[in-house]
Image (cartoon, rainbow, N blue to C red):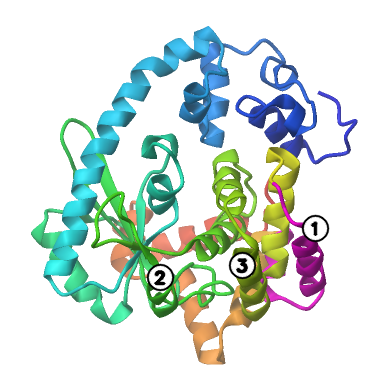
């Protein structure tokens, strides 16, 4: 497909895939077939692309897929519905156990929170885990609840600053598995880690009545801002339609007061540029209605120096991101600690990660692999 519209190739592709669900006239009048059928891909190849963007079942639900792709998705849909039902029971059980243990100050956020609060059917929003923000000082108590319910803590790097999350997993009926990402900061990116605190999100949050009155999720404005942060902070070199649909769906329900709250929060939290970028792409790809005065004010706010603007440089080498991450830490001691935890994680971790009994050899392999990764700009 040509680039006569002057769009980035990835956005041009997104327009074509968005047209599978939306009226093509509302997405620039582009014909999705020109991108999806280019090179005569097989039904499996088409489905793989839809899966990458996280919209396979959403497109199926809207009846906009070809028969050959529908046939492939039919059985999967039933499996996803059954899988969602199992995870729903497990999630409610978990949060009820949190409450019974006196752990009521937590927030379910990102994918699962949006799947139940924003989408008509939760299985339309694909996700591999559920994210929960907790108090760092209560981690041992949460660990005890997970142990009691039969969850296993997954292997991952740990440290004071190298990671602000742990993952707990439990096998359910059949081959279903539920994964819970427990966060004590909103992001592992140092620049974004303090954008929202547990206290802020919990005090202004809402109960997820679709699941349980023991589950609190962020309000709509905070959910949109978190979605914008997640899109760039965690996946700065990727663009997936599912993430844009989250933002599109949230923004489409905003009233005047919501937009004003968003403007106030982006200004105070220095998040105007990353929010503006996400909203403008949603407008381009999904025809999201955005008040002109809001966009103008975000542009004005984004002219100020915001640390998070670095994530708009999507092709920057990883080592430069890491440099900005170091500068975001408050002290030289913290900066040195982050470098140390990245280069020299715990010996037990390095032996397992590098599949060696010799920790020293494992560290050498890790340094070499890290040097290759951080100097690569990405594609």
Dividing the image into 4 quarters, which one contains the N terminus? Answer: top right
> In terms of depth relative to the viewer, which is nearer, 89 or 14?
89
Name which residue lies at 28% across and 65% down: 348
Viewed as shown, does residue 335 lie left or right of 74? right
Residue extending farthest left: 148
- The residue range painted magenta reads 289-315
Q: Residue at x 61, y 71 (%)?
A: 261
Q: Which numbered disc flags the more N-terminal residue, 2 or 1?
A: 2
Residue corresponding to mark 3: 257
Q: CA distance from mark 2 to mark 1?
A: 37 Å
| Quadrant in which the C terminus appears | top right
Question: Mark 2 touching mark 1, by CB under 8 A?
Answer: no
Disc 3 or 2, which lies upstream in sequence? 2
State if disc 3 and disc 1 touch (CB < 8 Å). no
What separation in Å lies between label 3 and label 2 (alpha carbons)?
33 Å
**Visible residue check, residue 323:** no
- Tag 3–tag 2 contact (CB < 8 Å): no
Residue 219 in the figure: left or right of residue 181: right
Mark 1 or 3, closer to the camera: 3
What residue is shown with label 2?
164
Coordinates of residue 45 in the picture (x, y in percent):
56, 19
Q: Which residue is mark 1?
A: 292
Q: Which element carries disc 3, helix, strand or loop?
A: helix
Q: To which quarter of the image does residue 103 belong?
A: bottom left
């Amino acid at each position: 497909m040509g680039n006569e519209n002057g769009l980035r190739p990835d956005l041009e592709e997104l327009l074509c895939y968005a047209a599978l669900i939306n009226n093509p006239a509302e997405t620039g009048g582009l014909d999705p077939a020109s991108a999806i059928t280019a090179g005569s891909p097989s039904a499996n190849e088409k489905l793989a692309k839809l899966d990458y963007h996280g919209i396979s079942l959403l497109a199926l639900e809207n009846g906009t897929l070809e028969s050959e792709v529908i046939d492939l998705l039919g059985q999967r849909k039933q499996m996803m519905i059954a899988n969602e039902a199992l995870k729903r029971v497990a999630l409610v059980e978990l949060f009820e156990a949190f409450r019974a243990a006196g752990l009521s100050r937590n927030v379910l956020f990102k994918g699962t929170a949006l799947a139940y609060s924003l989408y008509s059917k939760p299985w339309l929003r694909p996700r591999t885990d559920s994210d929960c923000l907790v108090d760092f000082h209560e981690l041992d108590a949460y660990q005890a609840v997970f142990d009691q319910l039969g969850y296993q803590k997954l292997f991952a790097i740990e440290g004071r600053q190298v990671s602000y999350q742990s993952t707990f997993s439990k096998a359910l009926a059949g081959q279903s598995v539920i994964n819970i990402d427990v966060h004590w900061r909103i992001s592992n990116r140092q620049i974004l880690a303090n954008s929202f605190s547990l206290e802020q999100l919990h005090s202004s949050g809402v109960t997820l009545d679709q699941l349980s009155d023991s589950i609190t999720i962020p309000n709509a404005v905070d959910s949109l801002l978190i979605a914008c942060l997640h899109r760039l902070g965690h996946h700065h070199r990727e663009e997936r339609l599912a993430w844009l649909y989250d933002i599109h769906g949230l923004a489409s329900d905003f009233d005047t007061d919501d937009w004003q709250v968003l403007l106030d929060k982006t200004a105070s939290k220095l998040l105007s540029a990353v929010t503006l970028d996400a909203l403008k792409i949603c407008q381009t790809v999904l025809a999201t209605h955005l008040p002109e005065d809001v966009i103008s004010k975000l542009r004005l706010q984004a002219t100020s120096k915001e640390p998070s603007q670095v994530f708009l440089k999507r092709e920057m080498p990883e080592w430069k991101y890491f440099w900005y991450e170091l500068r975001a830490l408050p002290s030289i001691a913290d900066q040195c600690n982050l470098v140390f935890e990245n280069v020299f994680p715990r010996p037990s971790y390095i032996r397992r990660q590098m599949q060696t009994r010799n920790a020293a050899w494992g560290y050498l392999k890790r340094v070499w692999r890290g040097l290759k990764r951080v100097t690569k700009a990405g594609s």
